[in-house]
Amino acid sequence: MPQVRLIHTLFQMHEITPLCCEVSPLSPSTEVAYFIEKGHIMEYIDLGPRTSRIVALFFGPSEFVVKCHPLSTLVTLDNVKGNPFTHGQVLNILRKFPETRHHYQGIRQTYNEKVAARQLSLTIMSEKARFEDMVKRQPWILKLAKSNDIAAYLNISTSLLSAFINNSKQNN
């Protein structure tokens, strides 16, 4: 069974034909991941001036950032400190230290679980449930991201986002 990728789910939600791009084989210098020691990063895809951006994922401290699409952009939401990893570095570490395979598999599993949770939220959860899930999992998003980016992430209007935020403040 073919793997469903996050980008396909995002494009389907926005009724956009998937963007194809030529993906070159990874060179040793290609950055494939970024470990966040401190700070927060947002990944989005800009589809042009007339179309709003699609916000794919938010990443926080102690997470590895792996882009979901070659055309996506990573932007810092605050002061970020971390370490980039190139394809060559990952391969060298795995070759020199075979015991790191367990850690590498754990990193991949954690990322895949994050993507699966995101896909589940987009395909099964109601708009309000998506908001509540985001607040539960990543409450810092409300403080650091712009409202139009949060709304794009949740696939809701900014007015509905404002209503959810106001309602959650009244209940607390």
Image (cartoon, grey):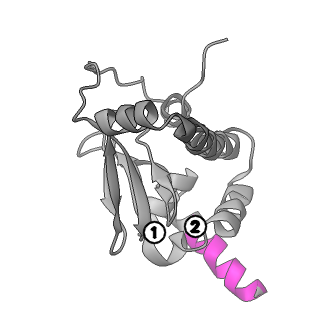
Residue 91: x %, y % from top left: 38, 31
The local secondary structure at tag 2 comes to helix
Residue 100: x %, y % from top left: 53, 41
Residue matched to label 1:
147
Residue matched to label 2:
161
- Tell me: 133 left or right of 143: right
Q: Against 156, is 101 above or below? A: above
- Quadrant containing the N terminus is top right
Image quadrant in which you'd find residue 108: top right
Give me the residue at 33% from left, 20% from top: 20
User: Does the residue at mark 1 contact the one at mark 2 (Cβ under 8 Å)?
Assistant: yes
Give me the residue at 74% from left, 57% from top: 129
Mark 2 surroundings within 10 Å by alpha-carbon count, few (fewer than 14), some (14 through 19), many (20 or more)? many
Residue 33: x %, y % from top left: 39, 45
Name the main secondary structure of what is drawn in magenta.
helix
Residue 2: x %, y % from top left: 61, 14
- Tell me: 110 left or right of 14: right
In the displayed orientation, state which residue is furthest to the right. Answer: 171
Q: Against 69, is 162 above or below? A: below
The magenta segment: 161-171
- Tell me: 30 left or right of 3: left
| Numbered mark located on residue 48 in the image | none
Q: Nearer the viewer, residue 22 or 166?
A: 22
